[in-house]
Every structure is written in structure tokens, then in C-alpha cells.
Amino acid sequence: MINEREWTQARLVTRRAVRSCLHCSIASVNADGSAHVTPIGSLLLGSLGRGIYFDVFNARLSANVDRCPEVTILAVDSGPMLWSRALMRGRFSRPPGIRLVGAVGPQRSSSPDEIARFHRTVGPLLRTKGGAAVWASLTRVRDVRVDRIETIRMGSLTP
């Protein structure tokens, strides 16, 4: 069972991961049983154990979760300040990353509030040619249920 403290930390790490490298990675299961990992830049965590992502470009991920909804999401804060401080001090001051283990719901229409929240997240990037091209039409979304949070461990650098 996830508690509020873990969830608050997961939301912070996920937000920093998306800001530092513009995506998280989602692992799903292919039809042949092999793993499929794809970047997703639109993950938004909300209330305890709940989140969404916009299901726009990821045809294989979409097919995989329709067949088998279990996923693992990897969010790593790749910010250079976090990593250089950790290397200089010999430890991280906060977790460098997390795994969110859970399941994805069926595709549904996105709400205007969900689109607005994501647009606030990407901010000025939405006004670029590329941002407008990839984020102008966010009509489909999937709900994410997080059952377990695993903090990334890096030996003695993480408490």
C-alpha cells in the first residue's frame, strides 16, 4: 500500500525526471512475452496512486496494454546539479529515480482540464514548432494505477 509521503516523493521525482530529460520510460509486455520500453513525456501523477498519460504516438505500447495492462514506469531525475552534487558528496540528497509498478486503463477521451494541466507542464515548449506539432492534439489519454513504488538504489550513493 502506498502512503502519502511515498506518493509526494514519487510526484516530485517524476516531475523532475520529465523536466530534466523530457520523458519517463514505460515498460510493457509484447505479444511474444518480451519487454517493450518506450519513452513517454506526458505522464502526470495526481491523487494517491493515480496518474494519466496521453496516448498519442505509442502504437505498440497501446496494443500491449490493451492486451496486458501491467506496466512499470521508470522516472530518473537526470538533472546535472543533482548528479554532480551526489558525485562530489558521495551520496544523493534525494532519490535519483523511482519505479512505479501498476497497470494502465483503457484508452479514453481526454478532458480539457487534463490537456490544460499538461500544457502548463510543458510551458513555453508548447509555443515551439516541435511542441505545437506533437502536443496540439491530445485527444486520447489512459489512466495509470500505481500499486507499488520502488526507489532506485545506487549502492552507497543512496541511503
Image (cartoon, rainbow, N blue to C red):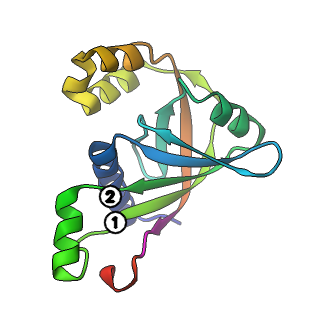
Question: What residue type is disc 2 on?
Answer: Thr
Q: Position of residue 39 (x, y in %)?
A: 49, 41
Quarter the C terminus occupies: bottom left
Question: What range is drawn magenta here?
Answer: 149-153
Q: Position of residue 152 (x, y in %)?
A: 43, 69
The residue most toward the bottom is 156
The residue positioned 33% from the left and 79% from the top of the image is: 158
Question: What residue type is disc 1 on?
Answer: Arg
Question: Label 1 vs label 2: CA separation?
Answer: 5 Å
Return the residue at label 2: 8
Please state if 82 lies on the left or on the right of 15 as rendered: left
Q: Position of residue 32 (x, y in %)?
A: 83, 46
* Above or below: residue 146 compared with residue 120: below
Disc ID at residue 59: none
Please state if 3 lies on the left or on the right of 79 as rendered: right
Return the residue at label 1: 5
Disc 2 is placed on an element classified as helix
* Displayed quadrant of residue 61: top right
Q: Residues within 10 Å of mark 1 (few under 14, many from 20)?
A: few
As for residue 150 lying within the magenta part, the answer is yes
The residue positioned 22% from the left and 74% from the top of the image is: 86
